[in-house]
Every structure is written in C-alpha cells, then in structure tokens.
Image (cartoon, rainbow, N blue to C red):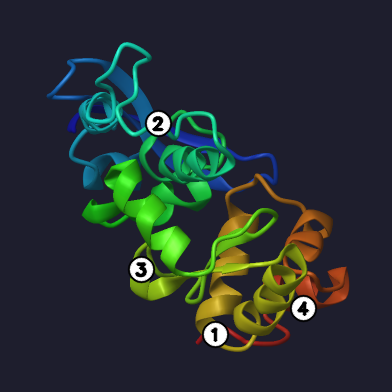
Amino acid sequence: MQLIKEIGSRRTKKGILKKWGRFLCLICLQEIEKLLYNGLRDKSCGCIRYKLISESNKDNKYGYKHGGYGTRLYIIWDDMKQRILNPNNPRFKTYGGRGITICDEWLEFIPFRDWSLNNGYGEGLEIDRENTNGNYEPSNCRWTTSEENQRNRRNNKIENIEQANEIRWLYNTGDHTQQQLAKKYNTDQTNISYIINNKIWKNK
C-alpha cells in the first residue's frame, strides 16, 4: 500500500482519536481509506490474495472442484478466511486487522477439511484457537462445543497482561461496549470495567 496522504484523526464511537490515511493499492490501483497503522503495514488492500484464493477452489461446472461447497464445514472455512483476509468484512478489525493470519495450507478447502475430519470435527462444534492471539493453523486450533469455547475464553483471555490488553484493544476500536465484551468473554461487566480502567492487570 502506498500512502497518498494522511487525512487526520477521526473519533470512534467511544470518542477515541485514531489516525487515518488515504492509500493506493499497488495491485488493483484502488484508493482506500484505512487506519494509518494498518495501511502502512499492509502490502495490498486484500484484493488479489482474496481473489486468487477464491479462484483456486473453482474448477468444475458447478464452480467448485472439491464438492464441499455449501456444507457447514465449508461455511466455517469460508467465514474464517473472510474475517482474516477481507478488509470489508465487519469482523476484519478484530482478526486480520490486528495481525492474526491463516496458514498457507488452509488457504484451500481440502487440506482444512481433511485436518478437521481427522481432528475431531463434528456437527455443532466450533473451531477454537488455543492461543487467542495466535493464528489459524493446525498447531493452534481445535474443535470444541460452544459451551467449552466460552469456558476457554473465560479461562484463557483474562489470566495475564497480554489477554487483558486484547480486551482493552477491542474496547478502544470503538466497536465493542463493555456489556458486549462481558458477553463475548463470558464474564461480568465489572471485570471488563476493571481491566479497561487498569484496576487489574495494569499496563506498565
């Protein structure tokens, strides 16, 4: 991405100032406004990589060579890619936008499908990252129930300064209220408030 110009700071819904810039994608030549930090770091707006990944999975007359299109597992895989690779996805900020990636092996559906079927996938289960700051890759992912996923979030995300900082980061994006974060992390709003205001797990 090439910076065209800085366009000043904008306030989030929570009144926090964030610097923005206007960038030129050197691949598709599209101009796009992004957070200044993200734009300076990104190599492209995400256009070509997302297009190539989509096209790599198209082949037969129905459009897909693997036969898994439309299955629940395919939808989970596609949703995972969208929030990691697509800057226009509403959840990109909290996934790809903060540096979480997906391993090259899982850019195609078949390897992801084979890993899933050999590692406990079943109807009703959710994919979960053991290290919530880590990437989507075989060594960091597992299949769990929704209830287990919520317990893991509670146990894993509020036990050290890194996890507390993740909550602060999400809050500072302006996209999450304290109540929403409490629900997301399966804890009460008081704990979220204490973390945000540095009453516990203080920044140093």
Left or right of 178 on screen, residue 10: left
**Which residue corresponds to mark 2?**
67
For the point 24% across and 54% down, the residue is: 105
**Which residue corresponds to mark 1?**
161
Above/below status of 62 relative to 116: above
Closer to the chain start, of discs 2 and 1, is 2
Q: What element carries label 2?
A: loop
Q: Is residue 164 something that shows in the picture? A: yes
Closest to the observer, 110 or 87: 110
Q: Indicate the position of residue 68 as horizontal and vertical percent values.
A: 44, 35
For the point 84% across and 58% down, the residue is: 179
Above/below status of 33 relative to 130: above
- Please tell me how crowded label 3 is: few (under 14), some (14-19), or many (20+) other residues with Cα within 10 Å: some
Q: Is mark 1 on a helix, strand or loop?
A: helix
Residue 194 is tagged as 4
Look at label 1 and name its amino acid: Ile
Left or right of 161 on screen, residue 53: left
Q: Which of marks 2 and 3 is in front?
A: 2
Q: Which of marks 3 and 4 is in front?
A: 3
Closer to the chain start, of discs 4 and 2, is 2
Q: Distance between the residues labelled 2 and 3?
A: 22 Å
Q: Which of marks 4 and 1 is in front?
A: 1
Closest to the observer, 161 or 50: 50
For the point 51% across and 40% down, the residue is: 79
**Which residue corresponds to mark 3?**
138
Closer to the chain start, of discs 4 and 1, is 1
Do callouts 2 and 3 mark residues in contact (Cβ within 8 Å)? no
